């Protein structure tokens, strides 16, 4: 298949070149955004990415430290700090940095208390906690700042750690993150991004209307990031029905669930023009595989959920929007925001207040739902769908300054109603789904909240 594709599209692959060694390297656009956000609130942990890793075998402290030394030597990002030179933020890659490992006896430390603010000018921007059992390492607590890594970076580090612990060799890395950041300065890359920017300006043209979800508390003048999270499972029968529907419509599970989420947001807000964010890996070049760095970008998926549409028609619209958006993911979210917004509302995120995330895992859903370390909420509401072989698990993360847990549980119940309606009658109209009755009845029964008090 690979050979056939090469014959049909010759010359389309352009390798990313290795950059020359310099004292400082530019930040990528994604890094610049995170640098600015951290400067605004240096004590924030909103852009820390935590993860736990169960150790695959018995390792001594010496063995564990030796493995991490090899990983730090392998990945430049783990030895990177963000400095300001001539009023411009830059990457500084050190040849050697202290190994940031803290040991804790079991029960003395958990992932949530491991998360602390980073000082971007001090490398490394990775923190390692080790939980001991009878003085032997049993679990890793990792915390990395988003400016040098993303979720896939942590997954890669965990995979490489396990491989090294088992004595397996790692393939050589030709490139590092700095090479990607330098490549983004090339005219050929910039021209491609400029073309993609025009796509986004066309797709997001017109009036930008904030999504008005029913809130339990008045929106603060400036954003607060304290969050909460609940989860719900759907069984294998529901998942099989949605998979069949996706196959019949030549769509994906992602598109099915996004369309359902759009219906929920439209019903809750009473609005048709729905703006929803979604993260993308940003690793759409073969040379970027295995590199630790900040590649994630955010896309804005704008969908009109019109009352006259059937679900099949809405799904077709979501499918078209999604494919086009993912085909234009090199253009950074902040570049789009700068062109679209003259003034930003400090109480909201720019362009959208809700996000949809989807993850497909190889295997069954975890038997136990671990306590989530997500103590921050960057958006009003986030729906994260976890898709396993035995069903779907939905995580509803919310901004606790705006909504109570009981409200989010109601929202999750409405989402269940929407999924059931889609399965039972995909030719039904979104406005006919039972939530429109049950939700508005609840609004009539609830006392009105005076936000001016």
Image: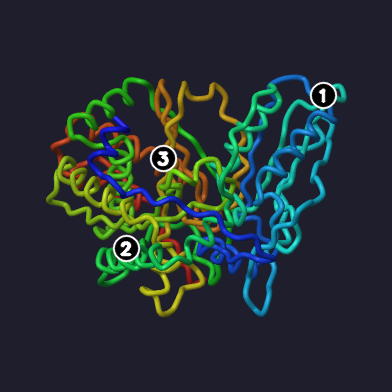
Q: Which mark is residue 299?
A: none
* Marks 2 and 3, how far apart at CA: 24 Å
Q: Mark 1 packing: few (<14 Cα in 10 Å), some, or many (20+)?
A: few
* Marks 2 and 1, how far apart at CA: 52 Å
Q: Position of residue 96 (x, y in %)?
A: 79, 51
* Marks 3 and 1, how far apart at CA: 35 Å
Q: Tell me the mark number nearer the camera, choosing from 2 and 3.
A: 2
Q: Mark 3 packing: few (<14 Cα in 10 Å), some, or many (20+)?
A: some
Kind of element beneath mark 1: strand
Q: Which residue is mark 3?
A: 358
Query: In the rendered image, which quarter contains the N terminus?
Result: top left
Q: Which residue is mark 2?
A: 196
User: Would residue 389 appear left or right of 89 to someone viewing this image?
Assistant: left
Relative to 268, does residue 423 appear above or below in the rendering?
above
Q: Position of residue 244 (x, y in %)?
A: 23, 26
Q: Which residue is mark 1?
A: 133
Residue shown at the point (49%, 46%) measured from the top left: 288
Kind of element beneath mark 2: helix
User: Would residue 312 appear left or right of 284 to someone viewing this image?
Assistant: left
Q: Position of residue 44 (x, y in %)?
A: 66, 60
N-term-proximal mark, 2 vs 3: 2
Q: Tell me the mark number nearer the camera, choosing from 2 and 1.
A: 2
N-term-proximal mark, 3 vs 1: 1
Q: Position of residue 211 (x, y in %)?
A: 36, 61
Q: Of residues 229 and 300, which is closer to you in this image?
A: 300
């Amino acid at each position: 298949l690979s050979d056939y594709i090469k014959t049909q599209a010759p010359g389309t692959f352009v390798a990313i070149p290795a950059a020359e060694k310099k004292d400082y390297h530019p930040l990528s656009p994604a890094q610049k955004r995170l640098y600015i956000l951290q400067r605004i609130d240096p004590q924030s942990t909103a852009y820390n990415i935590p993860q736990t890793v169960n150790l695959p075998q018995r390792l001594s402290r010496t063995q564990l430290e030796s493995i991490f030394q090899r990983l730090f030597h392998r990945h430049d990002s783990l030895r990177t700090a963000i400095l300001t030179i001539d009023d411009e933020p830059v990457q500084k890659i050190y040849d050697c940095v202290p190994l940031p490992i803290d040991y804790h006896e079991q029960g003395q430390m958990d992932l949530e208390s491991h998360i602390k603010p980073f000082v971007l000018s001090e490398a490394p921007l990775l923190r390692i906690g080790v939980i001991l059992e009878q003085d032997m390492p049993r679990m890793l607590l990792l915390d990395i700042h988003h400016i040098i890594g993303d979720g896939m970076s942590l997954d890669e580090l965990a995979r490489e750690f396990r491989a090294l612990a088992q004595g397996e060799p790692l393939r050589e890395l030709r490139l590092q993150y700095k090479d990607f950041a330098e490549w983004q300065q090339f005219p050929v890359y910039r021209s491609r991004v400029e073309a993609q920017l025009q796509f986004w300006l066309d797709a997001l043209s017109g009036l930008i209307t904030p999504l008005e979800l029913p809130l339990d508390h008045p929106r603060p003048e400036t954003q607060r990031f304290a969050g909460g999270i609940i989860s719900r499972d759907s069984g294998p029968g529901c998942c099989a029905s949605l998979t069949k529907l996706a196959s019949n419509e030549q769509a994906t599970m992602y598109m099915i669930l996004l369309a359902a989420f759009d219906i929920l947001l439209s019903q809750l807000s009473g609005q048709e023009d729905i703006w929803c964010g979604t993260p993308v890996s940003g690793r759409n070049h073969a040379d970027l595989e295995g590199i630790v760095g900040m590649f994630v970008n955010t896309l804005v998926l704008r969908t009109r959920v019109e009352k006259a549409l059937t679900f099949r028609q809405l799904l077709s619209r979501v499918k078209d929007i999604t494919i086009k958006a993912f085909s234009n993911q090199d253009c950074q979210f902040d570049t789009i925001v700068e062109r679209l917004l003259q003034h930003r509302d400090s109480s909201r995120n720019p362009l959208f207040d809700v996000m949809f995330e989807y993850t497909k895992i190889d295997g069954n859903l975890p038997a136990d739902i671990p306590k989530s370390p997500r103590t921050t909420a960057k958006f009003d509401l986030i729906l994260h769908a976890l898709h396993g072989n035995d069903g779907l698990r939905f995580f509803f993360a919310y901004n606790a300054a705006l909504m109570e847990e009981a409200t989010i549980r109601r929202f999750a119940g409405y989402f269940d109603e929407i999924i059931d309606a889609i399965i039972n009658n995909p030719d039904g109209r979104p406005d006919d789904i039972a939530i429109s009755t049950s939700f508005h009845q609840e609004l009539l029964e609830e006392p009105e909240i005076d936000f001016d008090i």
